[in-house]
Amino acid sequence: MEQSSSELHFEQAAKYRDQITTLRKVQQQQYVSGVAAEMDVIGMYRLKTQVCLHLLCIRDHKILGSKSYFPVVPSDTSDEEVIQAFIGQHYLGNELGSGTNEGLIPKEIVAPTDFELLNELASLLSKQSDHEVKISTKIRAERRQYLKLAATNAQTALVTRNSHKESMQARFVALNEVFELANGINRIECFDISHTMGQQTIASNVVFNQEGPLKTDYRRYNVYGITPGDDYAAMEFALNKRYGKIKSTDEESLKKMPDIVFIDGGKGQLAKAEDFFAMLSTQESLEKIPLLVGVAKGESRKPGLETLILAGSHQLISLPATSPALHLVQHIRDESHRFAITGHRAKRQKASKKSVLEEIEGVGVKKRQALLTHLGGIQEVNKADIADLEKVPGISKVLAKNIYETLHNK
């Protein structure tokens, strides 16, 4: 806020001021009085064979955050075994058991039930964190209230997840009613391209199964070796990265082959995808070719006006705006676009951060920092004359002249 104000960017400074005010209010609302300053509370809810564990974290008398976990457990597993396994894996697993967990294991863990290795786990956690860790199960007052809250959150999270899953499965069924695939639709992939005037081109590949987005299988590809701005070549590049090395004998890769591939674009983009998969087919790399469908935006680019283009016949399919099948197509298309543009913006921002000062001989990291700090930013460095540059610590008269001439192309 202060920096923006000093640079006369008052509108931006006002936004930062409002954010600071909001954060202060949130911190005040998060304050918890009368309970331990540092503890985790584990709530649990079971629905038949499904389990949800909700972790509520309190640090410095503030609710720092919470997260729900959905472990896959055998139907005959007891609550005690689930809690014991969760505590062991969460606090001593790969994420925290590599020597980086100091300060992350709280001084107290509130669990909903006793379990066999409670004392042993508490002792192990104490050694791992270099402070005493207590696992509490017999609780009263505030701790009981927070355990009840965590259990309620676990129930809500599981019910919401099931509702979302049922909705997603219904959309898959509706989509298969459109395309009538003999074995149904279990996996969908979608590709999109993002760039600015052909620069920092990124291709995205997002994946959905009947439970929704499968983010572990998402991929981004840095596109290179093409004519800048050639979206057709960029699409071919992405498809080749994803499917080019799959062989008909590669069982693991074949299990992850989609039933449908959506291409975010019109007939030109779709034609490139058709040519690519035709090439794979002739090389006998793949026996099963997924159904290819282009997603063309309507004239006004409004949601609900998309047209689906079927590969081969290039038949145009328009679905009602209320169609669950169309909602699924929109969801995966929008997710693909979001994933692509997020990657592109990150790449563009990284490129923009590369200072012209880095290209000047004799100006290393420390001297760049000195220039920017002393003069107040790259804009002020550009405005500075040789005399101003000389005043910066570590900048000689010769180097100041070199910097000035480089920045002004003299």
Image: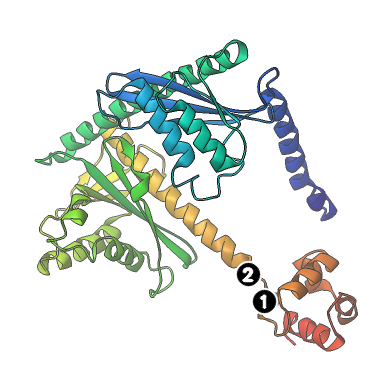
Q: Is residue 211 visible?
A: yes
- Does residue 273 appear to the left or right of 127 in the view shown? left
Q: Nearer the viewer, residue 259 or 249?
A: 249
Q: CA distance from mark 1 to mark 2?
A: 7 Å
Amino acid at dot 1: Glu
Q: Position of residue 17 (x, y in %)?
A: 77, 39
Please give the name of the residue rendered at 41% of the width and 50% of the height, measured from the top-left corner.
Answer: 337
Corner quadrant of residue 396: bottom right
Q: Is residue 367 above or below residue 327?
A: below
Disc 1 crowd, CA 10 A, few/some/many (<14, 14-19, 20+): few
Q: Is residue 29 above or below residue 126?
A: above
Which residue in the structure is indicated by mark 2?
354
Corner quadrant of residue 191: bottom left
Q: Nearer the viewer, residue 292 or 210?
A: 210
Please give the name of the residue rendered at 19% of the width and 50% of the height, measured from the top-left corner.
Answer: 255
Instruction: Give the colour scheme shown.
Output: rainbow
Please give the name of the residue rendered at 32% of the width and 21% of the height, measured from the top-left corner.
Answer: 78
Amino acid at dot 2: Lys
- Does residue 197 appear to the left or right of 172 in the view shown? right
Which residue in the structure is indicated by mark 1?
358
Q: Is residue 408 above or below residue 291?
A: below
Please give the name of the residue rendered at 76% of the width and 45% of the height, measured from the top-left corner.
Answer: 11
